[in-house]
Image: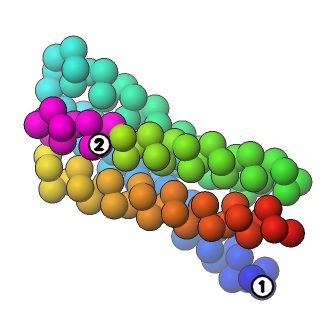
């Protein structure tokens, strides 16, 4: 990928991961104020904000192994977002439509970053 396209890709992914974090926080805030709701809130907020923070860190990492490491964390955290959103659906709490949208976005982000990681590992 040429440098300008790579820069555009990075900026788009920074935006996507940050939007995912914001939307997951909004989803979490609306969960019930009980033991389970509060547990999912905390886990989802932590995982989703970690997606955005670790992706940003991958963009400024200075070696390929560091980039791969940060991408790996980002992928794991996106998968964890999927888990907590699915868990909220399993427990019949939260907005089902919004949960499904966020599950799809977290999955797409993870899939894109898995492919990016594979490309870097093959270099």
Q: Is residue 25 visible?
A: no
Image height of 89 relative to 118, above or below = above
Dot 2 lies on which element? Answer: helix
Q: Quadrant of the N terminus?
A: bottom right
Farthest left residue? 92
Q: Is the magenta stretch mostly helix, strand or loop?
A: helix
What x and y, as percent, mark residue 66? 81, 48
Q: Residue at x 37, y 25 (%)?
A: 42
Q: Which residue is drawn at 41% across and 55% down?
A: 106
Between 2 and 117, the one nearer to me in the picture? 117
**Nearer-N-terminus badge (1/2):** 1
Q: Residue at x 37, y 35 (%)?
A: 44
Q: Mark 1 points at which residue?
A: 2
Image height of 59 relative to 45, above or below = below
Where does the magenta region start and end? 84-94
Would you say 56 lies left or right of 99 here? right
What x and y, as percent, mark residue 27? 25, 42
Dot 1 lies on which element? Answer: loop
Q: Which residue is drawn at 56% across and 50% down?
A: 75
Tell me, for residue 85, which label it has, or none: 2
Q: Is residue 111 visible?
A: yes
Q: Distance between the residues labelled 1 and 2?
A: 36 Å
């Amino acid at each position: 990928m040429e440098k300008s396209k790579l820069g555009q890709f990075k900026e788009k992914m920074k935006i996507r991961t940050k939007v995912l974090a914001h939307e997951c926080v909004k989803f979490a805030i609306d969960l019930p104020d009980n033991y389970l709701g509060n547990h999912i809130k905390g886990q989802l907020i932590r995982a989703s904000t970690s997606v955005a923070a670790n992706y940003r860190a991958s963009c400024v990492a200075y070696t390929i192994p560091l980039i791969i490491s940060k991408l790996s964390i980002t992928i794991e955290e996106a998968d964890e977002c999927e888990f907590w959103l699915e868990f909220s659906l399993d427990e019949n709490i939260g907005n089902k439509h919004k949960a499904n949208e966020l599950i799809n976005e977290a999955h797409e982000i993870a899939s894109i970053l898995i492919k990016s990681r594979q490309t870097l590992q093959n270099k």
